Amino acid sequence: MKHNKTILLMMVCMVMLLCCPFAYSQEPTPDTPSGPEEAETPPSVELDVPSNVAAKDTPNDDGTSITVTWDIPPEDSGVVGYKILRNSDGGDFEEIGEQIAPLDTYDTKEKINKYKDSQIVKDTSHAYIVRAIGASETTAESQQTEAVIAKAQWFHTGKIPLFIAMIIFCTAIVGNIYYAKGGKDIFVRRIPGLEAVDEAIGRATEMGRSILYTTGLGGVSDVATIASMTILGQVARRTADYETPLRVPCRDPIVMNVLREMVKSSYLDEGRPDIYNEDNIFFITESQFAYAAGVDGMMLREKPAAIFLQGTFYAESLILAETGNSIGAIQIAGTDSEHQLPFFIAACDYTLIGEELYAASAYLSREPMLLGSLRGQDWGKLLIFVTMITGVVLELFGVNWITTLLQAVS
Amino acid sequence: MKRLIPLALCFFFGIVMIATQFSPHPISKRVFEEVVNGALIISPFALVLATVTLIQTHATRISRRSDHWQYSFIVFAGLITMVVIGVPFGPKNSVFEWLYNNVQVPMDATMFSLLAFFIASAAYRAFRARTTEATLLLVAALIVMLGNVPVGNLVWNKLMSWIPWVDQASWADQASAAREWILDNPNLSARRGIILGVSLGVISQSVRIILGIERSYLGGGD
């Protein structure tokens, strides 16, 4: 009997020992930390087929792309990315691209329900299939889309608000030009920098020294250079009257030729072609700092009494303005480069800030048509100001259509 | 007629170039590129013009024995040397490259480095606290400088400790934050105002040029 009990105890122990390995091989509970090998094996999930897959000619482009869209999958879909397949003229489908989303950031999946195919063949119909990819390499393919041929658009519909704004602004300018042509008096606020032009020329004349005028580094296609040329024309008329030497070092040979013609024309208009000297308008160099060195050298050698720095300037602005300041010349600067304005304000006597440079031609010539365009420009500014204020007030009340419109334009 | 044709061309191409900005069509892009390339073709002719003018200017200076006329010989020496080496052997020639890298580049760098001294002298004049505006400028400049330099927070904390009503804990190490506030708020607002005015000025000037009201680019007033 005792022997039987011993046998029974041994059998129980054996069963327990045999059961232990099974206990260790069980699947971990959710609370049990899993090993790295188990983490790499994702659960096999049946993927949903991408729904509402559509291919459309990309709007507002030059006919070189087709955009494929599909619905955003649910959060627990197990989709980690998509592969895009394309055929041409009913041929076989080939993989052309993929959209992979990071596994840990679901939000980014919102961005992957679209694919822009920019590698299309011109005048060829293309159909698409979107293949969803799961974490365990499982896939699910959509139905093929209808075949699409990309076409170029003549008008960018996204730019309609910009086009309307341009039409309104141009209408305001042209309308005011006609208003001015009718002989109406137009008020222009006093611009100290332009009021000082006569003072600067007079000072140079009294001192018997020359006037130095530079249009900066801009080419003839720069609007600031054209504005500067107009100011030079007005300055040249006065120097012709006073017989004051006007020196114009140029950085661009085309600008130099235009300036020669312009100054010559101004001297002719004032009836003093005899004192016009073509050699006073000359080319120095196209190199930025060599040009600055050349103009600085002129300032130090010739010591002009008045210096005009009008046009497009870059890093050389302060080099020129400080040298002019050191020789005691009266300096009138003007530029539309907002980064250079602080340097001019610090170193020059008068500075035309931004738009004042463009207003200079109207201000100095007092020509009605130019003054009219200036008034139109102010109307545009007023419109922008009113839009901004209205937009801010409406935003405070939770109405954001002006903001949305402006964002659409940008 | 001498003025009518350029004005008509300017009007036509001005309108066409505006239209290209609103059309994504390939023909529109092609027109834009062709017009821009056409403008680039003028550059080589301008180069010849520039060289001729440069020679004329310096030859006249030498012949008239103007002030510092001797320097004009250096201009000719540089011009002839670069043409003699550059034209037959090309811009990749080692001597040409050596001259460019060891003469032109260092001289350019020298001129550019002068800017540091000019900034110092201009800043000295601009920041003299003689008026309210200049004082504001000085204070803003000091804060921006403190936000840029490595010892900025150290100086900032010391300055804050001198102001009795300032909460030391919340204002500590805020030099770069103060700098960013100045740059992102008052500075950016002013800059955007200027940019807005400039943009409208450019449009207005362009309309005047396209309509033939502004004719200065033709080389004369009328």
Image: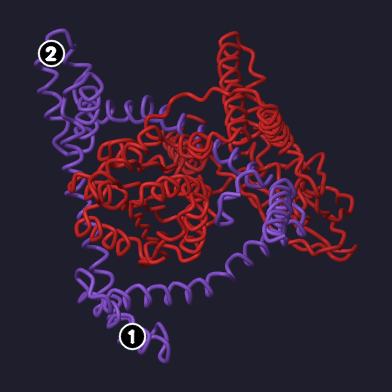
Chain colours: A red, B purple
Residue A96 visible to the viewer: no
**Which residue is identified by label 2?**
B163
In the image shown, does A112 or A409 lie closer to the viewer? A409
**Which residue is identified by label 1?**
B80
In the image shown, does A160 or A13 lie closer to the viewer? A160
Q: Is residue B137 left or right of residue B184?
A: left
Q: Check the residue under mark 2 and report the chain it is in.
A: B
Q: Which residue is drawn at 46% across and 62% down?
A: A256
Amino acid found under the numbered disc labelled 1? Ile
Figure quadrant of residue A95: bottom right
Image depth: mark 2 or mark 1 in front: 1
Indicate the quadrant containing the C terminus of chain A: top left, top right, bottom left or bottom right. Answer: top right
Q: Is residue A48 left or right of residue A379?
A: right
The tally of labels here is 2
Amino acid found under the numbered disc labelled 2? Ile
Indicate the quadrant containing the N terminus of chain A: top left, top right, bottom left or bottom right. Answer: top left
Q: Which residue is drawn at 18% across and 11% down?
A: B166
Q: Relative to B39, is A4 above or below? A: above
Figure quadrant of residue A168: top right
The first of marks 2 and 1 along the sequence is 1
Which structural element holds mark 2?
A: loop
Q: Which residue is drawn at 84% across and 58% down?
A: A126
* Label 1 packing within 10 angstroms: few (<14), some (14-19), many (20+): few
Q: In this view, does A322 lie to the left or right of A338?
A: left
Q: Relative to B205, is B182 above or below? A: above
Image coordinates for residue B59, horizontal then vertical, percent: 32, 78
Which structural element holds mark 1?
A: helix
In the image shown, does A240 or A119 lie closer to the viewer? A240
